[in-house]
């Protein structure tokens, strides 16, 4: 990823925050880091706020010894959910952006990274993907809120609560929508 920052034509490095009205269970209340984006080629991203409460070592068959055993796994998205991506997301100050590096494999046993392992390493099963024009259309329909990343979010210890926190800080209407129950009859 370039550290120059996103533009309207290239949103790589941005966060996609699901609008409270987005009801697709794959993306409801998610925050996605866009690792790649092009108006011509589509987009790829990873869900950052759905930890699986498992580590790489717990799922790896024949596992890799060492620090990778403790890498936390996340639901990365609905595409190729049997594919593992190990990704390093590190905050850099100048320019303020996320340094992103990824390592992919077709299965848990296929991902190999030579030590030393990068800081900020996380594992993702699956990824989010959009074909040409699809993401732009969803953004125009207000399914996603595009946000710049922040140090506080990238280095966050409790990603499960991040979506609600972002909505609470996005104004009274978003806060109200975010606090509404999934089933209005439970209100």
Image (spheres, rainbow, N blue to C red):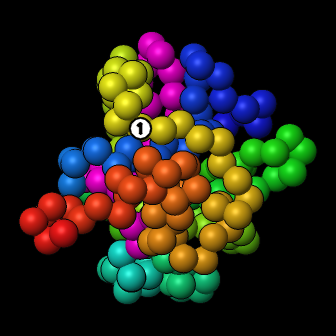
Task: Work out whether residue 83 can be spotted.
Answer: no
Using the image, determine if residue 7 lies above or below residue 69: above
- Which range of residues does the magenta coloring cover? 26-51
User: How far across and how far down the image is residue 113, in percent?
Assistant: 59, 64
Position of 163 compared to 133: left or right?
Answer: right
- Compare residues 154 and 29 and report the one nearer the observer: 29
Q: Residue at x 72, y 32 (%)?
A: 5
| 17 or 96, nearer to the observer | 17
Residue situated furthest right in the rendering: 94
Vertical placement of residue 11 versus 57, above or below: above
Quarter of the picture containing the C terminus is bottom left
**Residue 20: x, y in percent?**
34, 49
The reply to whether the magenta stretch includes residue 49 is yes
Residue 81, horizontal then vertical, whole percent: 27, 56
**Which of the two residues, 124 or 5, is positioned nearer the viewer here?**
5
Q: Quadrant of residue 129?
A: top left
Quarter of the image with the N terminus is top right
> Which residue is found at the position 38% from the left and 31% from the top?
142
Considering only vertical position in the picture, is 94 above or below 185? above
Q: Is residue 75 above or below residue 32?
A: below
| Residue denoted by label 1 | 144
**Element marked by disc 1:** strand
Q: Residues within 10 Å of mark 1 (few under 14, many from 20)?
A: many
């Amino acid at each position: 990823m370039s550290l120059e920052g996103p533009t309207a034509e290239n949103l790589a490095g941005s966060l996609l925050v699901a609008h409270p009205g987005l009801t697709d269970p794959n993306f409801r209340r998610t925050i996605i880091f866009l690792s790649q984006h092009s108006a011509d080629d589509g987009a790829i991203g990873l869900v950052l706020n759905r930890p699986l409460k498992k580590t790489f070592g717990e799922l790896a068959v024949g596992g890799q010894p060492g620090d990778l055993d403790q890498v936390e796994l996340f639901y990365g998205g609905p595409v190729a959910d049997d594919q593992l991506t190990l990704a390093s997301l590190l905050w850099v100050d100048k320019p303020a952006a996320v340094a992103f590096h990824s390592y992919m494999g077709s299965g848990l046993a296929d991902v190999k990274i030579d030590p030393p392992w990068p800081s900020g390493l996380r594992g993702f099963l699956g990824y989010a993907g959009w074909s040409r024009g699809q993401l732009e259309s969803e953004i125009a329909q207000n399914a996603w809120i595009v946000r710049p990343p922040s140090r506080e979010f990238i280095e966050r210890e409790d990603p499960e609560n991040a979506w609600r926190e972002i909505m609470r800080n996005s104004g009274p209407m978003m806060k109200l929508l975010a606090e509404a129950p999934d089933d209005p009859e439970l209100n």
